[in-house]
Amino acid sequence: MKKSIFTLLISIVVLLGCENDTSFNNDTKAHDYEYVNALSKGAKGNGINDDTEAIQKLLDDKSIKTIYLQENHTFLVKSLIVPSNKTLIIDGTLKVNEKNTYSSSFNNLIYGNNVENIIISGNGIIDGNKDLLQQGYFSLIKFENSNNIEVSIKRIQNNRLPNAKPSNITLGCLYFVKCENVKINDIQLSNWSREGIWLKNTNNSIISNIQCLGDKDSWSGIQVSGENNTINSSIVENAGASGISFDSKYSLISNCIVKNNRFYHGFNFGHKGIPTENTQIINCVSRNSAENGFTFGFSSKDNYIINSHSDNASKAGFLVSNGATNITFNNISAKKSGFGLAIYGATIKVSNADFIENTVPFKIFTGTLGSQYEFDNVKLSSDLMNSSINLIDLNHANSYKPVEKYVDNLTGFQYYKVFNKNVRPLSHIRLEPAHGNTTLAGPFLKEVNSNYFVIGLVNKPENPAWLRFYIQ
């Protein structure tokens, strides 16, 4: 969109006979939009003078739809209030002016309330200038109660909100509160301070192709609550809290990576008491998380995690707790973590998963809250998930081992205790006779427990008698 607007604009200038003038002016029109170069209307763009008044005047002019901040220029401002139906193209640098006096609490570089149809776009930079600021705590972009807002800037950086402030004083570098139809895409966000991109109680929005690079003041890279929201194709690195916190309903996260978050979790679902519901997480990866790679809590429910992986989490690759219900995992894996999968007071279904390469593959934490789980093809060890047992000759070369055979003197039934570290008390074991003799022996499943299960026979088997088992 940025390139298309710029190309269209240059073409119009040429058509108007202005081949030697590469700047825009307030006479340039296309499709009922007026493109105005702020330099032609009083802005200096020299990084010395304050340009707040000149740019704000253009924003307040109802006849002007689009304002252009030219490349290779730095526009110092205190704060800009954006009304409805405006496009701000930033190809230069829009920067917080450290020479101004700011409130000791909250300040906004770009702000709108109860507005609609806003585009903030360009190949330039929005710079919070935090190294030179001595006061004030900022959101570089903030909109409240607004609709149809699009932000697509090449770089946004250096927001000021020092970690020394108490945690109840918090802002988002890009902060949207009770908004609808927000689109944030194609941005490199660095040194954001506290929350990077925060959509709070915001609906029907998309965050796409974002790279978040944190520093010592940065908390969560992306945080979202509301309904029908999407995050895709984004990376968060070096966050000071959870990389991505998602407390949305009927939503989607796909193709996202969180790396090296210094506190809390890679992906956090059910954050600050707000449940995540009816949401899909697809093709996501957490690496080197300070605590858990993926965590679900606070009564989150009906969520689906597909084709996702956690690597080197300090605690659990995947944790489900605090009343989360109907959390379904398919084709997931965790490696080099304290626990591969851990649950506490939760209900989960897991299929096609691999938790072998962890200190503890699977852990149920005991307490007042009960847990329920269903496994299907979940690997907790290198032991075989399915194999065959020779009921006549346990030492047969092709028979699964280790198996112990014993007889109940009271009933006369034969029992086979099969040791396998993939088995847990709620595991489903399917038995399949390989011969008619095996069927006549009447095999049944007597017991399923941690690391073993027991097969019983009603009748003594005749040779040959092979029995196949499947751990589900």
Image (tube, rainbow, N blue to C red):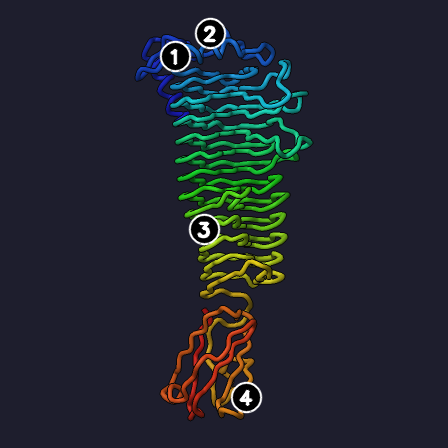
* Disc on the earlier residue, 2 or 1: 2
User: Where does residue 131 sit, x and y in percent of width and height?
Assistant: 66, 24
Whether residue 254 is visible to the viewer of this picture, yes or no, is yes
Q: Is residue 410 above or below residue 388?
A: below
Whether residue 74 is visible to the viewer of this picture, yes or no, is no
Secondary element at image label 4: strand
Label 2 or label 3, whichever lies nearer to me, is: 3
Q: CA distance from mark 2 to mark 1?
A: 12 Å
30 with respect to 324 (left or right): left
Q: What amino acid is labelled 4 in the image?
A: Tyr
* Disc on the earlier residue, 4 or 2: 2
User: Where does residue 405 sit, x and y in percent of width and height?
Assistant: 54, 87
* Disc on the earlier residue, 1 or 3: 1
Q: CA distance from mark 1 to mark 3?
A: 48 Å
Tag 4–tag 2 contact (CB < 8 Å): no
Tag 2–tag 1 contact (CB < 8 Å): no
Q: Is residue 207 above or below residue 1?
A: below
Secondary element at image label 2: helix
Q: CA distance from mark 4 to mark 2?
A: 94 Å
Quick one: which residue is furthest to the front in this view? 368
Report which residue position mark 2 lands on: 41
Report which residue position mark 3 lands on: 301
Of 411 and 147, which appears nearest the observer? 411
Report which residue position mark 4 lands on: 406
